[in-house]
Image: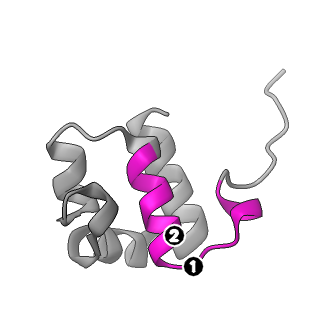
């Protein structure tokens, strides 16, 4: 997962403003007790950070990969 995909999924699931608050403030035990922003800066894979956010926030697994988007033509 690219970093841009991480931020797209965060924004889609939580809204742009709240996504930034969560990334800054929510501590993720699965990511070394870093926040999402800190974990990403430390080199954690964005997919790993995203899964940790989903688990902590109790997002249903069927929503972990965001909306179905039609391919560009």
Picture disc at residue 73:
none
Q: Which mark is residue 55?
A: 2
Q: Quadrant of residue 33?
A: bottom left
Residue nearest the viewer, comparing 39 with 33: 33
Q: Give the percent coordinates (x, y) of residue 43.
A: 21, 37
Q: Is residue 49 magenta?
A: yes
Which residue is rendered at x = 43% and y = 61% of the image? 52
Does the image show residue 15?
no
Residues 48 and 13: in front is: 48
Q: Secondary structure at mark 2?
A: helix
Q: Residues within 10 Å of mark 1 (few under 14, many from 20)?
A: few
Point 81% across, 29% down: residue: 71
Q: Which residue is mark 1?
A: 58
Note whether 59 is above or below 47 in the view shown: below
Mark 1 in CB contact with mark 2 (< 8 angstroms): yes
Q: Write the start and end of the magenta stretch as one range.
A: 48-64
The x, y position of residue 48, in whole percent, is 42, 47
> At which x and y percent is residue 36?
28, 60
Note whether 27 is above or below 11 in the view shown.
below
Is 22 placed left or right of 68 in the picture?
left
Task: Calculate the distance from the C-alpha at mark 1 to the C-alpha at mark 2.
Answer: 5 Å
Q: Is residue 31 magenta?
A: no
Main SS type for the magenta part? helix
Please tell me which residue is depicted at 45% across the width and 75% down the height of the picture: 56
Q: Nearer the viewer, residue 3 or 44?
A: 44
Judging depth in this view, the residue of 22 and 53 nearest the camera is 53
Quarter where residue 41 is shown: top left
């Amino acid at each position: 997962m690219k970093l841009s995909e991480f931020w797209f999924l965060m924004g889609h699931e939580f809204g742009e403003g709240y996504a930034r608050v969560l990334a800054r403030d929510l501590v993720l035990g699965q990511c070394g007790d870093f926040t999402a922003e800190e974990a990403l800066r430390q080199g954690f894979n964005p997919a790993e950070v995203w899964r940790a956010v989903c688990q902590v926030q109790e997002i249903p697994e069927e929503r972990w990969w965001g909306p179905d988007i039609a391919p560009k033509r």
